[in-house]
Image (tube, rainbow, N blue to C red):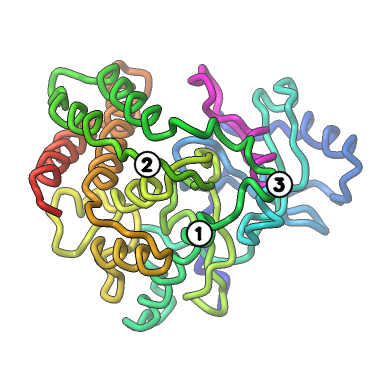
């Protein structure tokens, strides 16, 4: 299969975000890494958080991940944490890319960063690659493989493998609910609802029993890499910035918040970021059933996890819009994100009314 299916993922470096090779290359040499020649550098267009680059040396093809410039929230854009988490997880979850080196000295590039292997494959974005003849059965196979990878991650025995330090552990559900309630309130603008009904419902309906596992926290189709020769085979899972020890059903709920059906509201369909609407993809309820059956988990009422995922996404959208409204970013893409907040809050209220 031609590699042209991945060509639109990377572009020339954005103005003001160019890598400082005069500092980077001596640092690489100091680590005794066998990279020869001056690299051809391109930047990946996807992602609005950390910056990701491809460096093609004469004998190596690698990825560099770094934090953006400017003031950062406490705990955010922690490149060393992301590096060490993946390095520890790799032996027990093979879909993590191989880690190469990490730099904790911000003087080198203006932020911490790390190097990892580049996986040769294709990343499904908003629409599946047109170069592939996607039949319904191929789409269904990809969909099942995708959710199987989340299930496999949740079944990694973090205690047995010494991965206990990936998160704070007990109290995860309460921390997340109170944390996202506060974040949404802090980012509220005049044109969105206060969301108090949803916040109060989440606080009053937290599951009594908490189960912890390793969670990805941003598990989407556009964060996986497909095999170039088998479009239904996933060879990598990317973007581990938010991974932690947490509740598996909350992880599933967060993923489903991005899962848009073909028969969903036209507004939210316009915000779709992944090809979850293609014929052959499972519905949200089919995914819940699939997860429950594969993990032998009794799910009598999924509403808390669905509402949490939707409200968390509303908080993310509102934080982005708040920064736009205050002039911290000029990106016109964000000017209507307040509408997303309204839609998601209303959807939360509708889900709460359901009997499951």
Q: CA distance from mark 1 to mark 2?
A: 31 Å
Q: Quadrant of residue 326?
A: top left
Magenta-colored span: 65-88
Q: Quadrant of the N terminus?
A: bottom right
In this rendering, position of residue 91 left or right of residue 167: right
The earlier-in-sequence mark between 2 and 3 is 3
| In magenta segment, residue 78 | yes
The earlier-in-sequence mark between 1 and 2 is 2
Identify residue for label 1: 224
From the top left corner, tell me how far across and down residue 38 is, in percent: 80, 46
Q: Quadrant of the C terminus?
A: bottom left
Residue at (32%, 18%) from the top-left corner? 327
The earlier-in-sequence mark between 3 and 1 is 3
Identify residue for label 3: 87
The relative height of residue 287 versus residue 18 in the rendered view (above or below) is below
Crowd around label 3: few <14 · some 14–19 · many ≥20 (10 Å): some
Q: CA distance from mark 3 to mark 1?
A: 18 Å
In this rendering, position of residue 47 left or right of residue 344: right
Identify residue for label 2: 209
- Using the image, tell me which numbered label, if any, was put on residue 109: none
Q: How many marks?
A: 3
Residue at (19%, 40%) from the top-left corner? 344
Q: Secondary structure at mark 3?
A: helix
Residue at (25%, 61%) from the top-left corner? 284
């Amino acid at each position: 299969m031609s590699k042209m299916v991945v060509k639109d993922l990377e572009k020339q470096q954005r103005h003001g975000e160019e890598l400082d090779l005069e500092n980077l290359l001596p640092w690489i040499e100091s680590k005794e890494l066998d990279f020869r020649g001056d690299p051809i550098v391109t930047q990946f267009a996807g992602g609005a958080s950390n910056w990701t680059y491809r460096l093609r040396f004469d004998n190596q093809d690698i990825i560099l991940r770094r934090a953006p410039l400017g003031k950062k929230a406490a705990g955010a854009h922690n490149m060393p944490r992301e590096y060490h988490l993946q390095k520890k997880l790799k032996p027990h979850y093979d879909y993590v890319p191989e880690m190469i080196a990490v730099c904790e000295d911000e003087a080198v590039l203006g932020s911490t960063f790390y190097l990892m292997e580049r996986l040769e494959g294709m990343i499904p974005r908003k629409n599946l690659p047109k170069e592939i003849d996607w039949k319904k059965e191929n789409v269904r196979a990809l969909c099942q493989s995708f959710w199987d990878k989340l299930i496999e991650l949740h079944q990694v025995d973090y205690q047995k493998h010494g991965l206990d330090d990936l998160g704070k552990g007990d109290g995860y559900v309460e921390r997340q609910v109170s944390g996202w309630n506060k974040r949404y309130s802090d980012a509220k603008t005049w044109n969105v609802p206060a969301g108090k009904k949803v916040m109060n419902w989440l606080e009053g309906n937290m599951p009594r029993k908490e189960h912890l596992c390793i969670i990805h926290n941003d598990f989407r189709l556009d964060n996986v890499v497909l095999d170039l020769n088998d479009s239904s085979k996933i060879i990598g899972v990317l973007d581990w910035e938010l991974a932690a020890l947490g509740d598996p059903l909350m992880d599933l709920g967060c993923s489903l918040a991005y899962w848009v059906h073909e028969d969903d509201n036209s507004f939210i369909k316009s915000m779709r970021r992944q090809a979850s609407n293609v014929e052959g993809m499972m519905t949200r309820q089919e995914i819940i059933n699939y997860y429950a059956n594969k993990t032998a988990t009794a799910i009598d009422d999924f509403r808390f996890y669905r509402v949490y995922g939707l409200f968390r996404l509303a908080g993310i959208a509102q934080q982005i819009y708040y920064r736009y409204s205050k002039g911290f970013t000029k990106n016109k893409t964000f000017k209507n994100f307040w509408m997303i907040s309204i839609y998601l809050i209303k959807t939360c209220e509708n889900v709460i009314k359901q009997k499951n």
